[in-house]
Image: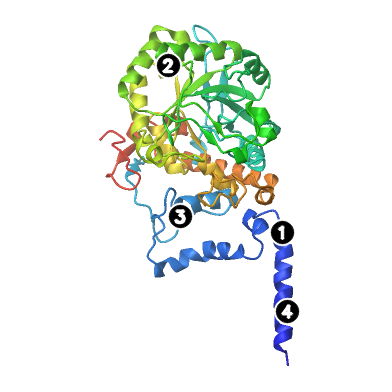
Amino acid sequence: MITLAVLLLLLAAAVAAIYVHDIRQTQHTILRNYPVVGHFRYFAETWGEYMRQYQYLPDWAERPFNRLERSWVYRSAKGVSNLVSFGSEAAPSFAFRNAPFPILEEEQQGYPGKTIGIATGPGACARPYHAKSFFNISGMSFGALSPAAVSALSNGARMAGIWMATGEGGLSRYHLEGGADIVMQIGTAKYGVRDSEGNLSEQRLREIAAHDQVRMFEVKLAQGAKPGKGGILPAAKVNAEIAAIRGIPEGQDSISPNRHRDIGSIPELGAFVNRVRTVTGRPVGVKIVAGRAEFLEDWFADCVAYPEHCPDYVQIDGGEVGTGAAPAALADYVGMPITQALPLVAEARARHGLQDRIRILASGKLITPDKVAWALCMGADFVVSARGFMFSLGCIQAMKCGTGKCPTGVTAVDPKFIKGLDPTNKAVRVMRYAERVLEEVEIIAHSCGLTNAAGFNPSHVTEIERGVGGFRNTGAG
């Protein structure tokens, strides 16, 4: 007869075996960081779909991203099927207008890509960039993200054939190691391209442009999570490596000015864009949060009058985007959502005849194929995502980004959390997620009668009602 002592011994041996397995495997960050107990999360995630009929919290109730959205990304990144059964749980406020005769497989064409920047004329650059993908990685700073996370994103971006923006924290070796195309962002503190006094350094611009991978530069005026306030990196995250890359003191809070001190008007913005483009030979974009419509009219009018002032692209950051740390008043109530901002900017661009000169990038919770395709319909040339790719790395929306204690290692600074994130494994997940988005956006395009996603326009989508997501009128008819 088996005694209680023997049962306890067998149980202890089983737990020990699970512990050893968990810390040695590289597929799941949570299990490496939280051996044994981490299995409870995966059990809840796996069986939750079948048990939710007995609880009161629906899949679409969570914020800022609901379970349906996050599960779609997780499944895509893992290479698991996203086919649904019985019926859709979505409550869309827009729908795509499918064609009576969709495109056959043999009629489908690959996405042709689009060129950013011009080679001749006022505002030309030495190396325009032909972007092959309409879905790419938005700016997330090294320091805000862990080295392992940046490395995984860089390698995954290269494997998927998409670009990766640095965020305002400067260019690190982790951005470069994967071989992906890089967009170097210039924030208000000019981290990575500043001199000893914090001013723009043309020497540093040339040094960064000397990297063949750096395809574009981006002047960040604002981000949707905190318009009118600079970036915040707590002192605990500013180690020696981060301080060297940014050109700031180690162990002190890294707080950017709320705007560029040398850009206080439209002419100054145009001159700054032209200066960076002239020095680097690369296309230069501007990242903004849409607010006053008259600014867009004045800005685009200036671009027409002074073509050398014209940016090569404009990134529209919706007010619903995220960040590591932001005042709640700014995150919740300042800045137009992408659903209103994108049509506003696209219409202003068209009024001034700049459709072929200025590309539009859209960002703001556009992490699934339906949202990406909607943005392309509404005038975006490209869509970029940050949090979608964080989910592909294993982010569980723990809301601890600014603490340095992210349990999945994505935004962690503590080595004990970072060690759980295996860059090699996660790079594959980044690639899978990007490829699934691209594939399913093309599926929507084919259903609408288009050979590829480059043909989307407002007539392909229509508003159903104001509901989840708050989408505005999105098409003719």
Q: Is residue 255 left or right of residue 339?
A: right
Q: Nearer the viewer, residue 453 or 10?
A: 10
Query: In front: 323, or 31?
Result: 323
Q: Amino acid at mark 2?
A: Gly
Q: Return the x and y of residue 285 as percentages of the image width and height.
A: 50, 21
Q: Identify residue for label 4.
A: 10
Q: Position of residue 282 (x, y in %)?
A: 58, 17
Badge 1 amino acid: Ile
Distance of label 1 from label 3 (alpha carbons): 27 Å
Q: Secondary structure at mark 2?
A: loop
* Residue 177, horizontal then vertical, whole percent: 70, 33
Image marks 1 and 3: residues in contact by CB distance under 8 Å: no
Mark 2–mark 4 Cα distance, whole angstroms, equals: 70 Å
Q: Earlier in the sequence, mark 1 or mark 2?
A: 1
The residue that disc 1 covers is 23
- Residue designated by label 2: 264
The CA distance from mark 4 to mark 3 is 37 Å
Check disc 3 and report the residue beneath it: 67
Tell me if I can see residue 353 in this picture. no
Structural crowding at the residue carrying mark 1, measured as other residues with C-alpha within 10 Å and reported as few (<14), some (14–19) or many (≥20) = some
